[in-house]
Image (spheres, grey):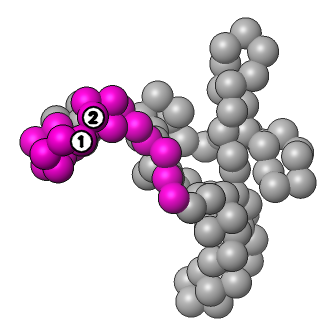
Amino acid sequence: MVFIQEMKRGLMQRQQGAPMSSILDRTLIFDEFETLDSAIPFIKRSAGIAEIIIVELSIGEGGSFEGKSKHGEKVEMLVAVDKTIPGQPSLAFENI
């Protein structure tokens, strides 16, 4: 439902003359994966976390989602993919 609320807000706040297709445009002006990757040292230091793995989701064979680390390794997903929203990364913490 959050995704629909975001679309509604985009519709209500769009600039006059902006094309209707801009409401559905979820393209970001930065690379989320690169931005999160560059923040790892700060997050580790400030939160006292030993290991951080950023997982990039893609659609694999058969239309199912699969997660890969920056090194291309397959990673088990710890968050419900159906609850994610474009442009808003999901977080999952695991005690090791």
Which label sits on residue 19?
Answer: 2
Left or right, 4 with respect to 88, comes to left
Residue drawn 49% across and 45% down? 27
Q: Describe residue 88's horizontal placement relative to residue 34 as left or right.
A: left
Q: Is residue 10 above or below residue 53?
A: above
69 lies left or right of 87: right
Q: Is residue 22 magenta?
A: yes
Residue at the front extreme of this rendering? 17
Specify whether 62 is left or right of 9: right
Q: Nearer the viewer, residue 22 or 39?
A: 22
Q: Residues within 10 Å of mark 2 (few under 14, many from 20)?
A: few
Q: Residue 22 at x, y = what percent?
A: 33, 37
Q: For mark 2, give the secondary structure.
A: loop
Asked if the residue under mark 2 is in contact with the one under mark 1, i.e. CB atoms within 8 Å, the reply is: yes
Q: On the rendered image, what quadrant is the N terminus found in?
A: top left
Chain part drawn in magenta: 10-29
**In this view of the protein, can residue 3 be seen by the observer?**
no
Q: Which mark is residue 18?
A: 1
Is residue 93 a member of the stretch shown in magenta? no
**In the depicted structure, whether residue 41 falls above or below residue 33:** below
Q: What residue sits 62% from the left and 68% below the top?
A: 35
> What residue is shown at x 75% (from left), y 22% (from top)?
60
The residue located at (69%, 50%) in the rendering is 55
